[in-house]
Amino acid sequence: MKQLSLYKRLSLTTALVLAMALVASPMVQAAKLKKQNLTQLISSSESIVAGTVVKVVDGIDANGVPYTEVTIDVGSVAKGKVAPGLFTFRQFGLLNPRTMPNGHRMLAMTPDGFPKWRANEYVVAFMYHPASRTGLQTTAGMAQGKLTLHGDNLLSNEFGNDGLFEGVQINASELSAEQNVMIQGDGPVGTDAFIDLVNKAVEGNWIEKGVMK
C-alpha cells in the first residue's frame, strides 16, 4: 500500500510538471511582450477574422491544462481557412480561480499580456497558429493582435494601438486618403478603413511583393 501511495504521489507530481511545461511557453512570451506592428501581425497570423464574440467559458482539459474557450461568430475572413460562421478556439488560462474536487484552489488565470475576451464584443483577431502539443491558441502579438470595436466605429487593442503602424511602409497610391492618414500615427482606427487595408494587403500579397514593409 505504501508503494502504491508513493506511486500516486509521483504520478501527480509528474502530471503537474508536464502541465506546467505545456503552458510555460506562452506564459514566457506574455512576460516578454514585444511591440508588433501591422506588417508583423499579418505575417505571423495563421488566420485573420472579424466578427462578434458570442460565448466565453473556461475549463480544465483532460491533461489538467486550464483554458478559456472563445466562440466568435465570424462575419469576414481576411486570411486563413476559417469559414464565416462560428469559430471556436481555446486559449491558456481560466477566467476566474476555481476550487478543485480535492479542495485545492487553482489560480491559473489567463496571464498578463494575453487578450481578454468578452461576449458581445466585435473584434478583429489576428490568430496565431495553435500550439502543436496542446492545441491552445491565441492572437499574434498576444493582446496586440486583438482589436475591439469601441464607440464611433473605432477599433483599438488593449494598448490603444501603440506601435501598430510604427515602421510600416506602404505605397501611398495603394491606399485611400483615410488609410494614408491612419498609418501615420497611433490611436483608434476606423473599422471599415482598417479592415479594408488588411484585406487588400493579404489579397494582394503586399508583404511578399514588398508593397508593404
Image: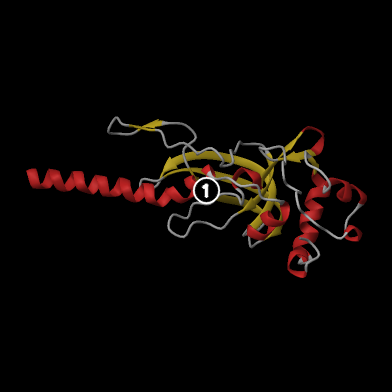
Q: Please state if 33 lies on the left or on the right of 194 as rendered.
A: left
Q: Is residue 174 visible?
A: yes
Determine which residue is flagged by label 1: 29
Q: Please state if 21 lies on the left or on the right of 177 as rendered.
A: left
Total numbered labels placed on residues in the image: 1
Which residue is depicted at the point 59% across and 41% down? Answer: 115
Q: Please state if 123 lies on the left or on the right of 179 as rendered.
A: left
Q: How is the image coloured?
A: secondary structure
Q: Quadrant of the N terminus?
A: top left
x then y, percent, for residue 10: 20, 47
Q: Quadrant of the C terminus?
A: bottom right
Relative to 135, residue 210 above or below = below
What is the quadrant of residue 59 in the picture? top left
Which residue is depicted at the point 76% across and 53% down? Answer: 167
x then y, percent, for residue 98: 40, 31
Which residue is depicted at the point 74% across and 64% down? Answer: 207
Relative to 154, residue 28 above or below = below
x then y, percent, for residue 201: 78, 60
What is the quadrant of residue 161 in the picture? top right
Q: Please state if 65 lies on the left or on the right of 70 as rendered.
A: left
Residue that extends furthest to the bottom in the rendered view of this protein: 209
Q: Around disc 1, counting alpha carbons within 10 Å, would you say few (fewer than 14), some (14 to 19), or many (20 or more)? A: some
